[in-house]
Image (cartoon, rainbow, N blue to C red):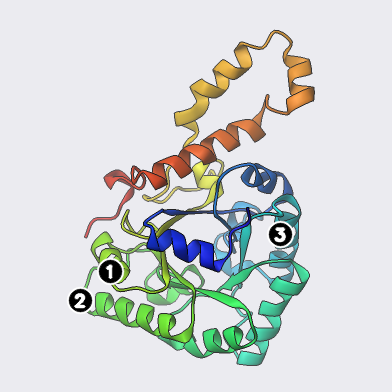
Amino acid sequence: MKQDIQLLLNKKLNHDTITFLTCYDYSFSTVLENTSLDMILVGDSGSMVVHGNPDTTKATMDDMLTMAKSVRRGAPSKFIVGDMPKDSYESSNEIAINNALRFINDAGCDAVKLEGGAIMCDRVKAIRASGIQVMGHIGLTPQSASTFGGYRVVGRSESEKNNLVKDFNELNSAGAFAVLLEAVPPSITKEIVKDSKSIVLGIGAGVEADGQLLILHDLLGLYPDFRPKFAKSFIIDVIEEFSKSITTQQDIVNFGKKTRKDGIHELSRLAVEKYIIDCKSKKFPSLEFTYNE
């Protein structure tokens, strides 16, 4: 059954951790379609992990729409969020609405995400008024990371903590159905979740969030350039199960032709399901994948 906003909100109310992964292409989206994952983010991180750029700021609307269309083809039943790239929403409400509509109408996304706190509330309100669901994103915001001292934990000082809480409340009031906290100390996440009506999602924000996001290429150990502290490869957890399923086959060639379960597709599916299980049971993120206060 395809997730919708109400089903996701019900998960929050029932303390059922929402599971969220990035995806950028058809083949991997078919992997996610065949799991119990709740949501997919077509992230501007694709600029890095797919196109090899040094950061997310090189992603364009055309890049994002191409990836989003491919993901929708492979995952027709999943709730998909389109990540609005840098320069696609900041300059005016009109530009923001037009680009958000492209994600919905052209690519078949269910919602859009944009970065920034209180300063972006006018954009959130405008996009919501056009009938589109919006996810906010605060803490470490990669599109503007160079302005705030690079890729670092946000919220260790009292002023940053206060700003995060203020930004979250403003986005909540503006109509964001969810807000993503990135690289935030877990105590702040816990405080925000406590009184939140919006869904609180975390990536590097501790186990207290209503849901967890991870970059698919980190989950699979597929991105060679670097891996942040909060990212875990789940391949090690499932490689033995996968190996056993292969070595017990008497005719591996026909097994592969009939099932397609002899390679990366099945190994990835197992790893994603393990991620989901560990998120739901609060085993992930454990302390070694959580930032210190």
Q: Are discs 2 and 3 less than 8 Å apart at CB?
A: no
User: Within the image, what quadrant is residue 69 found in?
Assistant: bottom right
Residue at 66 percent of width and 55 percent of height:
51
**Which amino acid type is marked by label 1?**
Lys
Height in image: 246 above or below 70? above
- What is the C-alpha distance between the residues marked 1 and 3? 35 Å
* First along the sequence among labels 1 and 3: 3
Amino acid type indicated by mark 3: Met
Left or right position of 24 against 139: right
Q: Residues within 10 Å of mark 3 (few under 14, many from 20)?
A: many
Label 3: which secondary element: helix
Where residue 195 appears, x then y in whole percent?
Answer: 29, 73
Q: Earlier in the sequence, mark 2 or mark 3?
A: 3
Indicate which disc residue 21 carries: none
Q: Circle 2 sits on which residue?
A: 158
Q: Which residue is mark 3?
A: 67
Q: Nearer the viewer, residue 113 or 130?
A: 130
| Tag 2: amino acid | Glu
Q: Residue at image x 35%, y 63%?
A: 152
